[in-house]
Image: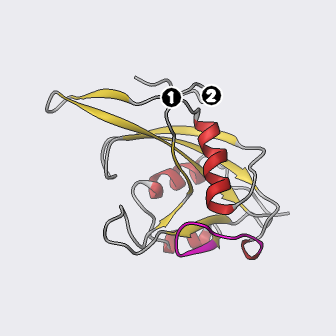
Amino acid sequence: MIGSRPGNTVSQVSAADEEHGIAVSVKQIAQVLLFDRACRLLIYLRDDKPDIPFPNSWDLFGGHVEEGETPEQALRREIKEELGIELKEWTFFRRFDCVAGDVYPNSKYIYWAMTHHDPGELTLYEGQRLAAITMAERETVKFANILDVIIDEFIGAGLWPRYG
């Protein structure tokens, strides 16, 4: 089992599929709940291509942890690739071990951070478009995979930043 503490270098691991006794590769993913200066959650609309998982669904920024990377290193790299900004500060929320509701088994390392940028100041390098939503607007958004659960738990923990 992979430890739930961030900061350790992760590599591809195998977990026994208890139901079938088959070893399954568990991918590591680092994502961030990124809030703008008005405390809105920045999200992006995935491309509408049938060959990608969850096409035309909203997603958080981040992506796969590459061999030899820590989740934090992957997070910084992915934010740079997707938004062109340097993420300098973040807080670890928690790890979600996803065995259902996604395309493949994975462990999602979820962080949250603030940026001084508003959506209009950012360039999106992956996906169709960028949006910023309030906590109240979150219920109207169709998120990819288990992100609804992750965002609900984040809200339930009282961590959504308050403006002012």
Dominant secondary-structure state across the stretch colored magenta: loop
111 within the magenta span: no
Q: Position of residue 28 (x, y in %)?
A: 46, 38
Query: As displayed, is residue 82 above or below residue 120?
Result: above
Q: Which residues are magenta?
A: 121-131
Q: Position of residue 162 (x, y in %)?
A: 76, 59
Total tally of numbered discs in the picture = 2
As measured in the structure, the alpha-carbon distance from the residue carrying label 1 to the one carrying label 2 is: 9 Å
Q: Is residue 1 left or right of residue 8?
A: left
123 within the magenta span: yes
Which residue, given by chain and number where applicable, does mark 2 sit on? 7
User: How many residues crowd mark 2 within 10 Å: few (<14), some (14–19), many (20+)?
Assistant: few
- The outermost residue toward the right is 164
User: How many residues crowd mark 1 within 10 Å: few (<14), some (14–19), many (20+)?
Assistant: some
Which residue, given by chain and number where applicable, does mark 1 sit on? 10
Which tag is nearer the camera, tag 1 or tag 2?
A: 1
